[in-house]
Image (cartoon, rainbow, N blue to C red):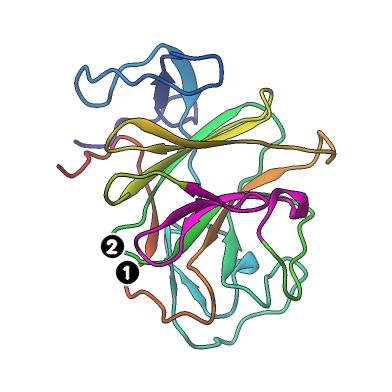
C-alpha cells in the first residue's frame, strides 16, 4: 500500500476502538489499515544521531539504527549515551496521544519504548521506570520482557516482527501491541513523580553492548505499511 498524503503537516491517523477502559484496543479487520473509532495521530519518529552511542549508526533518513561493533568518531556532547547502545528520537512529547511502530525483523536482541528527557546519559545504568525508562525488549530472540522491577516476562506466541507503541500522556500510559496479531502485549503506567512539563522521547536500543551485534537494523516503519502474512 502506498503512503497516504500528509494533511496540515500531520501524518495520517491511526484509530483505536477501545474495548476496555485501560486503552487496550480491540482491532477491527475491516480492510487495510484496520478501522478503529478513537483518533490517534501516528507520529513521525526520527532518530537523533547526537544522542546515539558511538557504536550506533543511524541511517540518513533517521529511520533505522544498527550496531557497527566499532567505536566511531563522533562529537562529544551532553545528550549522547556513552556506555550503552542507546539512542533517542529527535521528537519529545509533553502532552497528547502518540503512536508509532518498530520493525525488529529477525533480530535476536533489542529494546524500545520511551525515556524521560532527564535520564542519565553517562556511565552505566539500568532500564527501569524508576530511572526514567519504560521499555520492553527481547534478549535472545525467544523471550520477551517488560523492563519493570523485577522484569515481567511477556507471553507471546511466536515471533514479534512488528510492534506498535502507544503513548497516552493524559492517561499516563504506555502500551505495546503485536501489530500482526492485533493484540496488546503490555501497558506501563508512566510519569511517576517527574514533572508534567518534562518531555518523553521515543527510546531505542540494539541490545547489550556485550552481545554480538545483529546485522539487521532496528527500523521505525510507516504505520500503514502492509504487514507480512
Which of 85 and 23 lies nearest the eye of the viewer?
23
Which residue is painted at 29% across and 58% down in the image? 105
Residue 153, horizontal then vertical, whole percent: 49, 50
* Contact between labelled residues 2 and 1, with CB atoms less than 8 Å apart: yes
Left/right of residue 119 with respect to residue 215 in the rendered view: right
Identify which residue is drawn at 30% across, 31% down: 4
* Secondary element at image label 1: loop
In this orientation, which residue lies closer to the viewer: 202 or 155?
Answer: 155
Task: Give the percent coordinates (x, y) of residue 76.
Answer: 72, 79
Between tags 1 and 2, which lies in front? 2
Location of residue 90 with respect to 175 vertically, above or below? below
Residue at image location 53% in from the left, 80% down from the top: 55
Alpha carbons under labels 1 and 2: distance apart: 7 Å
Q: Is residue 183 toward the left or the right of residue 200 in the image? A: left
Q: Which residues are magenta?
A: 127-153
Residue 133 lies within the magenta run: yes
Give the residue number, with chain letter if any, for mark 2.
Answer: 106
Residue for point 63% across, 49% down: 148
Count of numbered badges drawn on the protein? 2
The residue at which mark 1 appears reads as: 216
Place of residue 222 in the rendered image (x, y in percent of width and height, measured from the top left): 35, 42
Q: Is residue 211 magenta?
A: no
**Label 2: few (<14), some or many (≥20) within 10 Å?**
some
Q: Earlier in the sequence, mark 1 or mark 2?
A: 2
Amino acid at each position: 500500500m502506498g503512503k497516504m498524503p500528509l494533511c496540515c503537516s500531520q501524518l495520517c491517523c491511526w484509530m483505536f476502538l477501545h474495548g476496555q477502559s485501560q486503552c487496550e484496543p480491540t482491532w477491527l479487520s475491516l480492510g487495510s489499515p484496520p478501522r478503529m473509532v478513537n483518533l490517534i495521530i501516528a507520529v513521525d519518529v526520527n532518530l537523533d544521531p547526537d544522542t546515539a552511542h558511538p557504536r550506533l549508526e543511524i541511517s540518513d533518513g533517521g529511520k533505522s539504527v544498527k550496531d557497527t561493533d566499532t567505536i566511531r568518531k563522533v562529537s562529544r556532547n551532553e545528550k549522547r549515551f556513552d556506555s550503552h547502545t542507546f539512542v533517542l528520537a529527535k521528537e519529545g512529547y509533553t502532552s497528547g496521544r502518540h503512536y508509532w511502530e518498530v520493525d525488529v525483523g529477525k533480530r535476536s536482541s533489542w529494546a524500545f519504548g520511551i525515556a524521560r528527557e532527564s535520564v542519565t546519559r553517562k556511565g552505566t545504568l539500568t532500564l527501569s521506570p524508576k530511572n526514567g525508562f519504560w521499555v520492553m525488549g527481547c534478549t535472545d530472540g525467544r523471550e520477551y520482557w517488560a523492563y519493570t522491577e523485577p522484569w515481567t516476562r511477556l507471553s507471546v506466541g511466536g515471533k514479534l516482527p512488528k510492534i506498535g507503541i502507544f503513548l497516552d500522556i493524559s492517561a499516563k500510559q504506555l502500551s505495546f501491541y503485536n501489530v500482526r496479531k492485533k493484540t496488546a502485549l503490555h501497558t506501563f503506567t508512566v510519569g511517576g513523580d517527574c514533572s508534567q512539563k518534562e518531555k518523553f522521547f521515543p527510546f531505542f536500543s540494539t541490545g547489550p553492548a556485550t552481545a554480538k551485534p545483529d546485522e539487521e537494523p532496528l527500523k521505525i516503519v510507516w504505520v500503514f505499511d502492509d504487514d507480512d502474512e
